[in-house]
Image (tube, grey):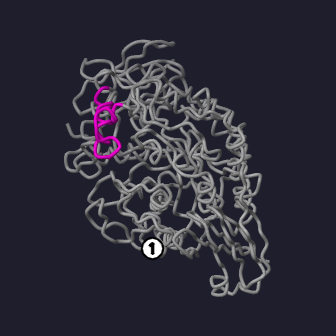
Amino acid sequence: MAIAVATERQLALGTARTSGGTRFRSLAPQGTDLRLVIHDGAAPGAYTMVPDERGVFEVTVEGAGAGDRYCYRIDGGPDRPDPASRFQPDGVHGPSQVVDPTTFAWTDRGWGGRGTNDLVLYELHVGTFSPEGTFAGAAARLPALRDLGVTAIELMPVADFPGERNWGYDGVCLYAPARAYGHPDDLRRLVDRAHALGMAVVLDVVYNHLGPEGAYLPEFYPPYFTERHSTPWGRALNLDDEGAEIVRHFVTDNAKYWIREYHFDGLRLDATHALVEDDGGAIVREIVQTARSASNRPIFIHAEDHRNLAAMIEDPAQGGWGVDGVWADDFHHVMRRLLAGDEHSYYSDFSGTTEELARIIRQGWLFTGQPSRHLGTNRGTDPSRVPMRRFVVCLQNHDQVGNRAMGDRFHSSIAAEAWRAASVVLLTAPMTPLLFMGQEWAADTPFQYFTDLEPGLGHLVTEGRRREFADFPEFSNEEARDRIPDPQSPATHADSHLDWTEMREPAHAAVFALYRALLALRLDQPALGGSDLTSGDADAPDEGSIVIRREGDGNVFWVVARLKGSGPVDLSSFADARGDQAADWKIVLSTEEPLFARDPAPPQIDTQTGGPVVHFSRPGAVIFQKA
């Protein structure tokens, strides 16, 4: 059953236009009778596919073209969709449809991409971001994000999934944009529109597992998974067992496909710690190289990985993997522990002090090899050679909201003034900030976990979801767990839709005004953008405050944030240590301005000494510019 190695060029699976028809190419075990069955169009019928010595089956059908629906039949078995289908108009169990990408009229020929120093990422879920829940609905909202100051949108996975609603991490058709969101050309229009507005587009891709329903790919290629390694989802992707070469090409071809055919500017690789192989990181390095080779524009690759591996985001010349950025969750975890008091699960590794936060801003993450109580092993490596902009930090993302039992947002657990102060720290830190949709106006809507699996699987997911929180004190009894939203209920999905009308309400409008002002300042002042330096400059004057100094392009900014409680923060000693004590100090922004706070409590600021003394009566933040 083993399939021999194919080259990247020869593997190119799926459909491709020819001069008079369409070429179909698929995998199947050697010795298989693989038939192409075309259901409609100008050339309906069954066609025998011919394998080459590498196990790639192919047939060209004259007259077949875009819009035709087709499937494959292995040894006379049930019809199956193409494992490299470009579109599944009837769902992941139905026939595939031929798509011709060359007919789309792109208008972004002059688009040169965004620089990595001014990246402000905005993560969104297409199905709940707009009232329509479609690619077209998201495209219509892009001008609002551009005006906010977002420079790159990050789409949660769009590879087609079972049912009509899903986060996207249950994808099974890795080349097919989800039909629940629209046609593939609707996704192209979304990317094209973003480029016209000056925004990059990043796609979240999942290679470490397939969803639990409709995953027919292993029928076409049984060695797709291996028993040699395991992951939280079961068997691992086969990256180093017999037949792994085909799997590696399938993954890297997919990365190239999204860049080439949809003009994406980058990819976010989901859970790279679950891409297990003896040569750790090799597949990630291959994805990076292949994706960048697919475009003449700069392409950036980010990864989600909890291991704090500096090698991932170091340059290949230093022996690194060449990834452009990694989700550095220590920032979020310390903020959440500090402000909301969370201490369960991975929060148990953090004390939630301002000193921990300052250390993260100085070096990128907290754990650099220390023991992790949560993991039961040491975690992290030394990031001292890594530019600060390669750490992607957030106060909210889909995991840190949606994986909470009720899908509640961070800002709903803390006072509005503390949220404003934390937001200032996020958007003035030397790392790359990521916002989660609705964060910019402190949305009241939750983002809950939702699925639309077949009833048997759906019941297991519901039960598993509630069992997952049994160890949490607030869900220790069955009655409490029953209040956790049912992932299978349409209401759970509906409740997770953003309510854009909230921005008309004064409290939400004030938060939005703050985010817009902070992003305008960040984009206008290079000193406040992502830093190429390998360390940041931050201190913790006391257990409730943090001070950040940013310098660049001839400008110096000081950020003073009181995250908890009240009291004075004296910059004199910090300014003196950095030679800023004799400066004139201009107040650039305060979170207690009436535009940002409905009940402002302005801090008293003394700027007549060697450095400003800010007297906070409650949490808040002030940004100074040194003249």
Q: Position of residue 559 (x, y in %)?
A: 66, 69
> Could you tell me which residue is drawn at 77 percent across and 76 percent down?
585
- Residue 198 visible in image: no
Q: Position of residue 538 (x, y in %)?
A: 57, 74
Q: Nearer the viewer, residue 368 or 296?
A: 368
Q: Position of residue 295 (x, y in %)?
A: 58, 50
Q: Position of residue 284 (x, y in %)?
A: 40, 56
As helix, strand or loop, the secondary structure at mark 1 comes to helix
> Could you tell me which residue is drawn at 69 percent across and 66 percent down?
622
Image: 255 above or below 92: below
Image: 293 above or below 172: below
Q: Where is mark 1, residue-wise?
A: 318
Q: Look at label 1 and name its amino acid.
A: Gln
> Could you tell me which residue is drawn at 71 percent across and 84 percent down?
580
Q: Which residues are magenta?
A: 459-482
Q: Quadrant of residue 626?
A: bottom right
Image: 421 above or below 269: below
260 is within the stretch colored magenta: no
Left or right: 343, with 568 as reference point: left
Quadrant in the picture for the N terminus? top left
Q: Nearer the viewer, residue 175 or 552?
A: 552
479 is within the stretch colored magenta: yes
Q: Nearer the viewer, residue 36 or 463?
A: 463
| Disc 1 residue crowd, few under 14, some 14–19, many 20+, Cα 10 Å | few
Q: Quadrant of residue 171?
A: top left
